[in-house]
Image (cartoon, rainbow, N blue to C red):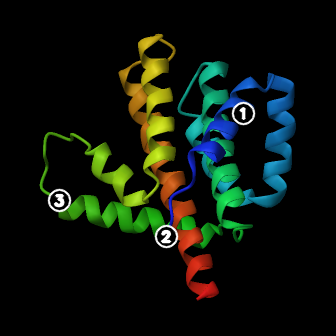
Amino acid sequence: MKPIDQDTIDFAEDFFFKLSEAQLREMITEFKKKQWELCKLLTSFESEFESQKNKSIVWRFGLITDYCFNSFYGKLSVISLQTIQDYFDREIKASQNKPNQNDKIDYDSQMDAIGQPELMFCLGTKINDFFNEKILDDEGANKMMLGILSIGELYKNEAEKLYLEEK
């Protein structure tokens, strides 16, 4: 599967991070109409943060990911609750099968598995920037990274289904 192009990623990053809070809320309302179950997942990620700024970052990352995948691959299917549950069941099972490595998470291999190096680099760099600017602490940066990896994997799986259907 071809990676999302840099122009699409740059546009999305610029657009979604320039939205005012009111505009962001409007975009979230529209997003809920298309991806209700994914919105519940993002709401769950959002609840991990106290600061409104961090809550907004969660949504901006989710909207960037949605925009990039849908713009580049065409309209993806709605991601169902069952799809989300299956994904997390596989992740839990995989983590139980790995020996404890001091609970250190290998973000690079997870980012590579999504097959979107430019998008994951962009979002990872944003998280690092927020960490350096003290907007996110270490725990918050880790939670944010796990959130975007989960969303990225869910979208990748849907894009692959679409790709296979077209063949």
Nearer to me, 85 or 6: 6
Secondary structure at numbered mark 2: loop
21 w.r.t. 36: above or below: above
Q: Is residue 117 left or right of residue 103?
A: right
98 w.r.t. 1: above or below: above
Whichever of callouts 3 and 1 sits on the residue coming sooner in the sequence is 1
Q: Residues within 10 Å of mark 3 (few under 14, many from 20)?
A: few
Residue at 62% x, 86% y is 165
- The amino acid type of the residue labelled 2 equals Met
Identify the residue position indicated by label 1 in the image. 16
Residue 101 % position (x, y): 13, 45
- The amino acid type of the residue labelled 1 equals Phe
Q: Residues within 10 Å of mark 1 (few under 14, many from 20)?
A: many
Distance between mark 3 and mark 1 Cα atoms: 37 Å
Residue at 58% x, 89% y is 167
Residue 108 % position (x, y): 30, 45
Whichever of callouts 3 and 2 sits on the residue coming sooner in the sequence is 2
Identify the residue position indicated by label 2 in the image. 1
Numbered circle sitting on residue 98 = 3
Q: Is residue 81 left or right of residue 138?
A: right
Secondary structure at numbered mark 1: helix
Residue 88 % position (x, y): 44, 62
Distance between mark 3 and mark 2 Cα atoms: 28 Å
Nearer to me, 106 or 91: 106
